[in-house]
Amino acid sequence: MVSLDRFRPRKPIALDAAPSAVLAHPSSPKALVLAPEFGTVYEIDARPLTISRRARAGNLAAAMQLSPDRKSLWVLYQEPSALVEFPLDTLRAGRRIRLSVVPHAFDLSSDGRAAIASRQDRSIVIASLESGDVQHVIDARDEPSLLQWQLDARQLIVGSRPERSVGIFHPESGRAVVRLPLPLEPRHFAVKADGGQIFISGDGMDAVVILYPYRTEVAETMLAGRAPAGMAVTNSLPYLLVTNPETNSLTVLSFDNPGRKLVGVVQVGQEPRHVLLTPDEQYALVLNEKSGDMAVIRLQSLLTSDSLSSRYRPTPLFTMVPVGERPVSAAVVAV
């Protein structure tokens, strides 16, 4: 835990197993933490810094996500294979979508559907969150490595690492609208707030691919530093933040200005792989896996001004905060 008022670490909270993901509770000063090896969700109260509740509905979990109405947490289990709902008011297992194959990834749509991918079976299950019924199964043909519903839920975007491609599917019919080759293996998606652009990074190219889902086309690539990894998109500024683990840096790109793509490169800690924004977008928080710390970057300091020379321009790197060994995820919780 880190206090963003003073940018100092607070006491650590011991868990029974290693966590993989953290989400902020949508209505309480709490965080939801997934420990996949035990299939357990921990609810952390950010005020006393204690575990307030825990829940479990299987032996091995793969991912978690808040429901579209933000009243439930859905957890994808591999043992047994199911997508399970945990209402936030009780944090007890509720509705359960049973699966006949081992799942690996999922995404929830704005209209209350789940898309659940199985890499081994090369299939995608479309199911109703309300009824728990499987509506149909899409034969993806290529391995479905990443899933992303289009903002209006009319299309499903599927990235395939082995085939270096992205497919856009019509979820009702299961028909592939288009399959687009990529110059890299897609490992990360970052979506602009209006859903009009999806940024894709992955192995094989020192660049980020820009996909326009509504136009069903790959528009261009932007150089994004060495071996781009995790990304974040700002809403107040047209900025894409890209981590570069091999060079211990964060590359900042402006995607709305064709004449000037690169805003800046900020040196952070060792092996930065994850970046997130504070809700007010005043700071970007970069998790450095190897050095075990968090770099805090002032986004306003990235704005250039003709009236200020680089000598007097404030540095974007505000501070570094130790957070413990190999940080993998974070969330900002209002206390």
Image (cartoon, rainbow, N blue to C red):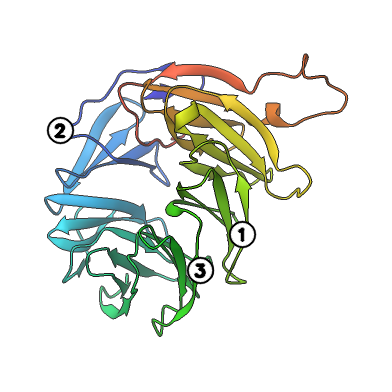
Quarter of the rendering occupied by the C terminus: top left
Q: Which mark is residue 194?
A: 1
Q: Nearer the viewer, mark 2 or mark 3?
A: 3
The crowding category of the residue bearing disc 2, from other C-alpha atoms within 10 Å (few below 14, some 14 to 19, many at least 20), is few
Q: Residue at x 16, y 43 (%)?
A: 37
Mark 2 and mark 1 lie on one chain; the one further toward the N terminus is 2
Q: Is residue 90 visible?
A: no
Kindly report the distance in space between the C-alpha atoms of the residues bearing marks 1 and 3. Answer: 22 Å
Residue at image mark 3: 180
Mark 2 and mark 3 lie on one chain; the one further toward the N terminus is 2
Question: Observer-nearest residue: 161 or 237?
Answer: 161
Answer above or below: position of 246 versus 242.
above
In the figure, is residue 60 to the left or right of 211? left
Tell which residue pokes out farthest to the bottom in this image: 173
Q: Are the residues flagged by discs 2 and 1 in contact, CB closer than 8 Å? A: no
What type is the residue that disc 1 sits on? Answer: Asp
Kindly report the distance in space between the C-alpha atoms of the residues bearing marks 2 and 1. Answer: 39 Å
Q: Nearer the viewer, mark 1 or mark 3?
A: 3
Tell which residue pokes out farthest to the right in this image: 307
What type is the residue that disc 3 sits on? Answer: Leu
Mark 1 and mark 3 lie on one chain; the one further toward the N terminus is 3
Residue at image mark 2: 16
Q: Place residue 93 in its image quadrant.
A: bottom left
Secondary element under disc 2, as helix, strand or loop, is: loop
Q: Are the residues flagged by discs 1 and 3 in contact, CB closer than 8 Å? A: no
The crowding category of the residue bearing disc 1, from other C-alpha atoms within 10 Å (few below 14, some 14 to 19, many at least 20), is few
Horizontal and vertical percent for residue 235? 63, 47
